[in-house]
Image (spheres, helix red, strand yellow):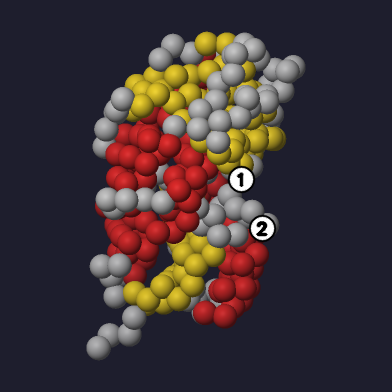
Amino acid sequence: MQKKIKVMIVDDSSIIRQVIQKHLSEYNIEVVGTAGDGKTAIEVFKKTDPDIVTLDITMPEVDGLTVLEEMMKINNTAKVMVITALSDKATGLKAMKKGAKSFLGKPFTPEKLKESFSRLIE
Amino acid sequence: MNETDLHFFIDSTVNYFEEVTNEKATTGIPYIKGDEPVVLEYTGIIGISGKRKGSVYITTNAAMLNDLAKIILNLEEVGVEDIRDLIGEIANTISGNVRQAYGSDFMISVPVVVDGKTKDIRLPDSIQSFVIPIMWRNYKSFLAVCLE
């Protein structure tokens, strides 16, 4: 059996965390951790060593771009998909420069999420 | 604030509902907020800083959030915590999306959620605030925009 992809979901909205988990459930994944703020996200990342992280930007404690930098220092092979309402090009470029592999604007449809995720695991 | 600013927020709001529900929301004629309260059962407030300063809030009733959350989660029933969370997420998404027009110097805060009908939501007195009525299905909501 193929090894499950370890996924971590970071968003301060519990609804968005649920939606991401639900739509990605058709993939061979295991959700190893979730976080609703940036500080917790870094702790969970260290503990769970995920293969893929979905990461919001506007969050309490520590913002997502800072979290991304920290994650890349810890393990730069982790693939980070930034999912944010800050959908302007400059933010997208900034995220990619800091190590994100994918950038998806909110609001997103299930199709757009799956399309981005599929590209990420190819 | 001018008409162009209002259009950015109207477009962002209409796009939110269409993208999330595949159903169109319509907006009424914006008006200047006076002393009359504009507050319904749940309100999501975003502080704006950077190039523009002020705040934005969306206020609506539990029934609308309940319907919307059921669509988003594809569930028959949703909890109070879900609808409380959702109003914050709507405020965040509508405000965040206008950065496509204003650029990344338009900074938004994390949402603050007020539940239960309060007297009103306090906005800075020194800045003119506009109210945009929103209709989705048969539910009325209001987006208040107060920007320097």
Q: Residue at x 69, y 35 (%)?
A: B49
In the depicted structure, whether residue A40 falls above or below residue A105: below
> Mark 1, chain letter?
B
Quadrant in which residue B48 is drawn = top right
In the depicted structure, whether residue A46 falls above or below residue A79: below
Q: Amino acid at mark 1?
A: Val
- x%, y% of residue B96? 53, 39
Q: Residue at x 37, y 76 (%)?
A: A30
Per the image, label 1 sits on a secondary structure element best described as loop
The residue nearer to you, when weighing A90 against B144, is B144
- x%, y% of residue A85? 49, 44
- x%, y% of residue A109? 31, 48
Q: Is residue B128 left or right of residue B77?
A: right
Q: Is residue A39 left or right of residue A56?
A: right
Residue that label 2 marks: A62
Q: Quadrant of the N terminus of chain A?
A: bottom left
The residue nearer to you, when weighing B61 against B111, is B61
Check the image and name the residue furthest to the right: B126
Q: How many marks?
A: 2
Quadrant in which residue A35 is drawn = bottom right
- Packing grade of label 2 (10 A; few <14, some 14-19, many >=20) is some
Q: Quadrant of the C terminus of chain A?
A: bottom left
Q: CA distance from mark 1 to mark 2?
A: 11 Å
- The answer to whether residue B70 shows anywhere in this view is yes
On residue B110, the disc is: 1
Q: Residue at x 64, y 12 (%)?
A: B35
Q: Amino acid at mark 2?
A: Val
Q: Residue at x 51, y 57 (%)?
A: A11
Per the image, label 2 sits on a secondary structure element best described as loop
Looking at the rendered image, the disc whose residue lies closer to the viewer, 1 or 2, is 1
